[in-house]
Image: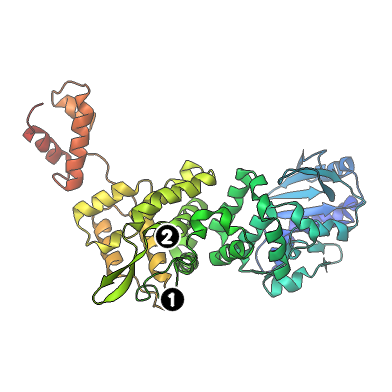
Amino acid sequence: MTPLLPASLSRIFRETPELARAYLVGGCVRDWKLGIQCTDFDIEVYGVDPDTLLASLSRWGRTDAVGRAFGVVKLTVPGHVFDFSLPRRDSKSGPGHRGFEITFDSSLDPREAASRRDFTINAMMFDPHRGELLDFFGGETDLRNRVLRHTSEAFAEDPLRVLRGMQFAGRLDLTAAPETLELCRQIAATHSELAVERVREEWIKWATKSVRPSAGLRFLRDSGWLDHYPEIAALVGVAQDPEWHPEGDVWTHTLACLDALAELPAWLESDSRRRLFLTLAVLAHDFGKPACTHEVEREGRRRIVSPGHEPAGGPLAASFLGRLAMPESYGAPVVPLVINHLAHLNAPTPRGVRRLAQRLIPATIDDLIVVITADVFGRPPRPREVPSGVTALREAAEQLQLERTAPKPILLGRHLAASGLTPGPGFKRLLDAAFEAQLDGDFQDLDGALQWLRSRPSE
């Protein structure tokens, strides 16, 4: 198993008497048990007061006291930042995630402190002095069995924990215990108490860190919280033509697409921003189907079709992103990817590829191909095969060098001025017309652009 402690932290424990009753807690212990390399270390210290904790850590590096009455000390040493905190008592004093009275109590019993944590897998503690795991609530067994279980009834005091359950289920491929789902259903009405920033943070973690995104969304559905996201809830039960979608309804298809996306090298190799908008685009790609799906008679049989669902999904995706107050830099690529996710069904022409690249801004054709691939792969038991239309689109974009960018205007204002035209309101109209002609393929370089300009009748 991967060693839990970096050498610097091991030495701090060994040579700091005030840390005799200090334990690693939370995610670092969980990840260690999973064999995941730990990068964030949280240490809970018992039996000392805040001033003593701060003074004892100051000799190891830079210390920053944070939290109410500095219940947390951040220690910065070369290569690491460690969070040391005193055990805390939380008492519910008002609605929402922030409605707590928090006091730090170094005399608290470790078991009682652990009982305040959200899930059993996050309530494990590790004693670095004895090399022992303290597991009061069966977290190790739940982790081994991939079960997400609340630690105690205190779970219900903080509704944000339900959304934490969503992202943990997706990140670790967990299935929630029935009693945890029931508790979540009992507090479903408290979603409105949550600050949108905290809600968004959990969705971002789900979208960027999940290994099985479908597990997170199933948790939301089974916990009764999916109805708080109507664009997603509407997908449940929307029928699809079994010839093209043997996997089932739109909900089932969307979950399969998200899982396929999380396995694609292009997604795995992306930074967190790109992972985020690709995941959200795949999540939203069929938001338009509930309103557009109906049956028609074709070729002597009843078929299920969803004409126009791509453009219909754009405003719904925007609505979902708006409810999360997603920053423009993160969410802007999602809507054009949703609206254009069937672009590969048209034979690519140079004109079509140039205009597609322009419509996708700030996303790219390369991004679109990832979304399309996830869409196609999310149709089990059909084989995961990249359609010829996707290959053709990629090749056409690469030939035009537009797979990762959009066309940039060739003819600029300075060229108009150099041609003897007087700057004025007509410049914009002329430049817009030039760019449209460029997208249509009327010219491909500056000489061609100037020739196009000379051929136009004077206004």
Q: Where is residue 383 in the image (x, y as percent from the top left)?
A: 39, 78
Q: Which of marks 1 and 2 is nearer the N terminus?
A: 2
Q: Which of the two residues, 142 or 412, is positioned nearer the viewer here?
A: 142
Q: Where is residue 394 in the image (x, y as percent from the top left)?
A: 29, 61
- Residue, x 8% and y 33% (percent of image)? 456
**Disc 1 versus disc 2: nearer the observer:** 2
Name which residue type carries label 2: Pro
As drawn, 219 above or below 355: below
Answer with left or right where residue 49 lies relative to residue 196. Answer: right
Q: Position of residue 136 (x, y in %)?
A: 84, 67
- Which image quarter: residue 66? top right
- Residue, x 18% and y 24% (percent of image)? 417
* Residue 290 seen anywhere in this rendered image of the structure: yes
Element assignment for label 1:
loop
Label 1 close to label 2 by CB (< 8 Å): no
Q: Name the residue under label 1.
A: 380
Q: Name the residue under label 2.
A: 290
Q: Quadrant of the N terminus?
A: bottom right
Answer with left or right where residue 68 lies relative to residue 342. Answer: right
Between the C-alphas of marks 1 and 2, the distance is: 21 Å
